Image (tube, rainbow, N blue to C red):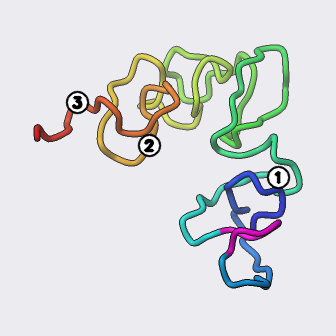
Amino acid sequence: MDADDDGYTSAGGGTVESADLLCDGAGEATDLASAGDCDDASAAYNPGAIEDDCADPADYNCDGSSGLVDADADGFAACEECDDGLGTVNPDADEVCDGADNDCDGTIDIDAIDAGTW
């Protein structure tokens, strides 16, 4: 279930019956939807949310910190990076092929340093 239709499901899960079995209606999520939505009642809160207002105390991206806090001690405040729960994820980090946005540029695994040459 994705109650707020932001593409993320709550960590606790939940299910909703699909009227057409396509899992694309209101409140439905496909099996590809990412978990970790800390507030499935508001689309503003999800792991992919931008949190760049250093004066706003809300934890929109569900990483456990906000504002000028640097919980992962990587030299970047929560409002300056995309995941303040991981020290290896920040704007100065190298992008690697791991399914995460390591360098906080809004893309996943693009221009990764360990990408193969084709």
Q: Earlier in the sequence, mark 2 or mark 3?
A: 2
The boundaries of the magenta stretch are 23-29
Give the position of the N terminus as an image quadrant.
bottom right
User: Observer-nearest residue: 65 or 10?
Assistant: 10
Mark 1–mark 2 contact, CB under 8 Å? no
Q: Label 2, label 3: how many angstroms apart (C-alpha)?
A: 13 Å
Q: Which residue is mark 1?
A: 39
Q: Which residue is mark 3?
A: 113
Above or below 77: residue 88: below
Determine the image quadrant of residue 4.
bottom right
Q: Amino acid at mark 1?
A: Asp
Q: Amino acid at mark 2?
A: Ala
Disc 1 to disc 3, how far (Cα)? Answer: 34 Å
Q: Earlier in the sequence, mark 1 or mark 3?
A: 1
Which residue is at a point 22% across and 30% down the rendered structure image?
Answer: 113
Residue that label 2 marks: 100
Dot 2: within a 10 Å radius of its alpha carbon, few (fewer than 14), some, or many (20 or more) residues? some
- Residue occupying image coordinates x 44% and y 43%: 100
Cα–Cα span, label 1 and label 2:
21 Å
102 up-or-down from 55: above or below: below
Whether the magenta-drawn stretch holds residue 94 is answered as no
Specify whether 111 is left or right of 75: left
* Kind of element beneath mark 1: loop
Q: Main secondary structure of the magenta part?
A: loop
* CA neighbours of label 3 inside 10 A, class few (<14), some (14 to 19), many (20+): few
